Amino acid sequence: MSEERKSLNFLEQIIEEDLANGMPKENLRFRFPPEPNGYLHIGHTKAIGISFGLGEKYNAPVNLRFDDTNPAKEEQEYVDAIKEDVAWLGYKWDKELYSSDYFQQLYDWAVQLIKDGKAYVDSQSSEAMAEQKGTPTQPGVDGPYRNRTVEENLDLFERMKAGEFNEGEHILRAKIDMQHPNMLMRDPIMYRILKKHHHRTGDDWCIYPMYDWTHGESDYLEQVSHSLCSLEFKPHRELYNWFKDQVYDYSKTEYPLLPKQREFARLNLSYTIMSKRKLLQLVNDKVVAGWDDPRMPTISGLRRRGYTPAALRKFVETVGVAKRDNVIDVSLLEFCIREDLNKTAPRVMAVLDPVKVVITNYPEGKEEWFDSENNPEDETAGSRKVPFSREIYIEKEDFKEEAGNKFFRLKLGGEVRLKNAYIIQANDVIKDANGEITEIHCTYSEDTSKKVKGTLHWVSIKHAVKAEVREYDRLFMDEAPDSHQDKDFMEFLNPDSLKIIEAYVEPSLVEAKVGDRFQFQRLGYFNVDNDATSDHLVFNKTVGLRDTWAKQKPVNTQNTTQKPQQKNQPPKKKAIDVIQQLGKKYTNLPEAKQQKVKAEILELAKEISYEELQPLFNTAVKKVGTRIAVALVLGVLLEQGLEKNTDVEEFIDKALEDKNDILVAEAQTL
RNA sequence: UGGCCUAUGGUGUAAUUGGCAACACGUCUGGUUUUGGUCCAGAAGAGUCUAGGUUCGAGCCCUAGUAGGCCAACCA
């Protein structure tokens, strides 16, 4: 196998390094830790792909752990949905676990911390504590309860647990450093009183641990080796380590391995939102039909839309793993699903926007069943029979009375092939009172070997089956709907994100089952929606076929799929910056292009002031291109009447001595 | 008046200091085609945020800037 070694992403490199430094391979263990407060979305697919992917790569166990420490937001429904989604993606978790399983252990450790003077009960209002906490730029100050005695802390904490206090009366904090530059280290809260019913522990507890205190310790208890999360948790790492070091002191014999938190950039998709809170709002406000609405970026939505696990996994793999913020273009997602479906989806004919065609020389009442290939990409896919008769539907879009020769569909007098059937010629049209075409009259020829430019899909009217087709467009019309400080993301909702169409499909489709995926020939990929019944077919459009023809049609420009006009043009690059840029590559350019760039620089030079140019006189000797550009600009400035001063003279002298001929030549003209 | 992180074609990700920066998506040509799909062949597009420095040699190391992101929930 000449398999090229695929470069490792930075997380894999960390693991390889740990392994090289002596960590036994058996110690490798990962986890995916969702909070069950919403459905998983495409962004989670990346996180899932990373941790479970690493598990597959190193043959290491991966736990599915629900981070359920906030009874106010979490529900069993979400637990079930999350499990379904992860399983559907094709990943197998080692253990199904819950942070709430560790409540007792966490409590015992907290008591230990109090005894060691490393945690205390604070009894102020949240406002008072927030004030003492300071700001990112200002240090905090110690609160009045910071130095309570161990006995008092212990007593209070026990009574918190016993339910003697109301929510908000007391909290338990770690005693770290109120002046710490990292705000998370300024005595973070470990426990709050919450008299709420928990989906798993019921009413056993009325104090609940906070994320930082729970998450790391759960990793530790599970002996997770690498705890991978998204970038916004980077500042938490310091606290993660602090807590970890404390409990390690208490339990190192039982739990010898110290987990390591590392952070990667989360996935962002253009034209979509990825916040569970905002997604929930779409559901609650009934903008969409539910979490699994095919327009939603949720895993369940994509599943219902017709996406495959393979396509999603390919997508997150292609997207890569790194540490810088990113926005992935939806076109990549679309590419992945097309690539998969092209190989697997049976081809079928459906007409979404019909116009009637009558084949006048085809006998009335006659019908023929033509053999049709199910998938040209898959020889094993076999074939099926498709009925043909005197009256058929084709797409309105596929006929024009008159058209240029770039339009190779049907036009009056023109010929076109009907997929899997005959070649027809259009002779006449019948219109209604409004001038709308109601019928196209054609004649057919049995010679199918003839070469014709266009091939159309069609469906025999007599045999056609009616079906509901749901066509989706993006939910938001802005590239980054939730990144505007002055505008709410809801303002960018696309009013036409759902179009319901009554379509005619070939009769073989009556057999289609919920979830089945097809390619409607020449149109796109569609799957059978959950709403379909035995007498009412419903299809979702997963994604259209690539359409290089649509791009050429000017008509298409008012389409919502078009990029909206950029309102605020990005500020024009400063002329001096452009010149620097151009100068850089100057010496690498072929002669002809050099002349072009030179002209460009000379033009831009008119916008340059001496003050802008002056700093560039010191450009490093080796950056010849930049110096040539400077020389060119200087020439223009001198022409405009600039007086030579010592800086200018020095620059010219140095240029004249250079070993680069172009620079010398330019300097000589000055 | 802080701390941390990041900076490579339009987008995303590579490049184990050393041959004019690679791959994928997207874009554009051309060919094949009973899908304007697929497939095949090719092209354009960055000289690696800026300025210094170290080095024989820097996208990679150092310094200083600049730009963007994250951090002040009894959320996770």
Image (cartoon, rainbow, N blue to C red):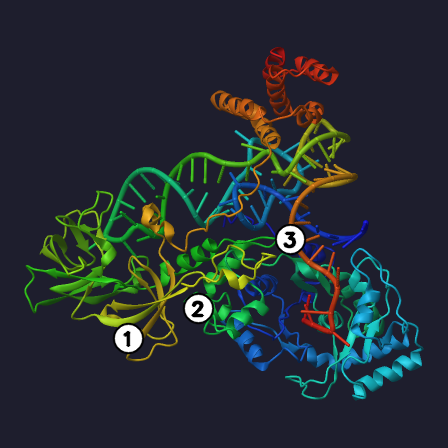
Q: Quadrant of residue A404?
A: top left
- Residue A529's spot in the image, x, y percent? 38, 73
Q: Which chain letter matches label 1?
A: A
What residue do we see at 63% from left, 66% from top?
A60
* Same chain, labels 1 and 2: yes
Asked if the residue at tag 2 contacts the one at tag 1, i.e. Cβ–Cβ closer than 8 Å, the answer is no
| Label 1: element kind | helix
Between the residue at mark 1 and the residue at mark 2, the CA separation in whole angstroms equals 23 Å
Question: As shown in the figure, which amino acid type bears the numbered disc 3?
Answer: Lys
Q: Which chain letter matches label 2?
A: A
Question: As shown in the figure, which amino acid type bears the numbered disc 1?
Answer: Glu
Q: Quadrant of residue A274?
A: bottom right
* Same chain, labels 1 and 3: yes
As drawn, is A158 to the left or to the right of B15? right
Quadrant where the C terminus of chain A is found in the figure: top right
* Vertical comparison of A73 with A310: above or below: below
The residue singled out by tag 2 in the image is A294
Q: Which mark is residue A511?
A: 1
Counting residues from the start of the chain, the first of labels 1 and 2 encountered is 2
